[in-house]
Amino acid sequence: MEEFQDIEEMRMLWEEKMYQEELEWKALGNKFEACRKALGLTATATAKLLGVSTGSLRKFELGQPVFVRKSITKSYRYLLLLIVQKLPEGSEWRNNMESMLGQENIFEGITVGYCLQ
């Protein structure tokens, strides 16, 4: 009977971990989607730039499990960083995007030079 309780406890811990990850994925996906839309990019164009299907991008933005989630996250960060760096210094667009992106620290130390390597 004790073995069953250990298994049940493990299942409950696993479900809680999955729930927390789902919330994190959803928050990150929503942030990327908001940035994409603020820049006027369509999901189709963004997916093409990232090299993924539109369906995979939509799932990612909705926080649903996607097999290539880490790859999409990294590529999306690079894309947004490169776009923001091309905006005129001090422009309202650039300031708004830097503010929006900076709130969640989605770049995690990525620099333009790193993106171009």
Image (cartoon, rainbow, N blue to C red):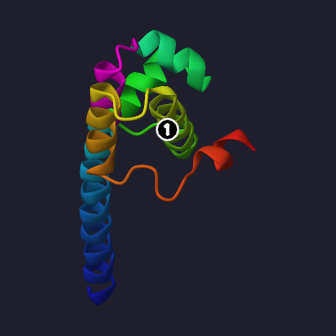
Residue 78 magenta-highlighted: no
Q: Specify whether 65 is left or right of 103.
A: right
Residue at x-position 38% and y-position 28%: 59
- Quadrant of the frame with the N terminus: bottom left
- Left or right position of 45 against 5: right
Tally the marks. 1
| Residue 33 within the magenta-colored segment of the rendering | yes
Task: Give the quadrant of residue 21.
Answer: bottom left
Residue 26 shows up from this direction? no
Give the vertical position of 45 relative to 117 (above or below).
above
**Residue at disc 1, secondary structure:** helix
Q: Which secondary structure dominates the residues rendered in magenta?
A: helix
12, 97: nearer the viewer: 97
Q: Residue at x 43, y 27 (%)?
A: 88
Q: Amino acid at mark 1?
A: Leu
Residue 78, image x, y percentages = 55, 39
Direction front: furthest residue: 90
Q: Residues within 10 Å of mark 1 (few under 14, many from 20)?
A: many
Residue 114 in the image: state x and y as whole percent. Answer: 66, 49
Q: Quadrant of residue 90?
A: top left
The quarter of the image holding the C terminus is: top right
Q: Is residue 2 above or below residue 69?
A: below
Q: Which residues are magenta?
A: 32-42
- As drawn, the residue found furthest toward the right would be 117
| Left or right: 115 as drawn, with respect to 40 | right
Q: Residue at x 32, y 30 (%)?
A: 35
Residue occupied by mark 1: 81
Where's residue 22, x and y in %? Answer: 29, 49
Quarter of the view holding residue 38? top left
Residue at 29% over, 78% down: 4
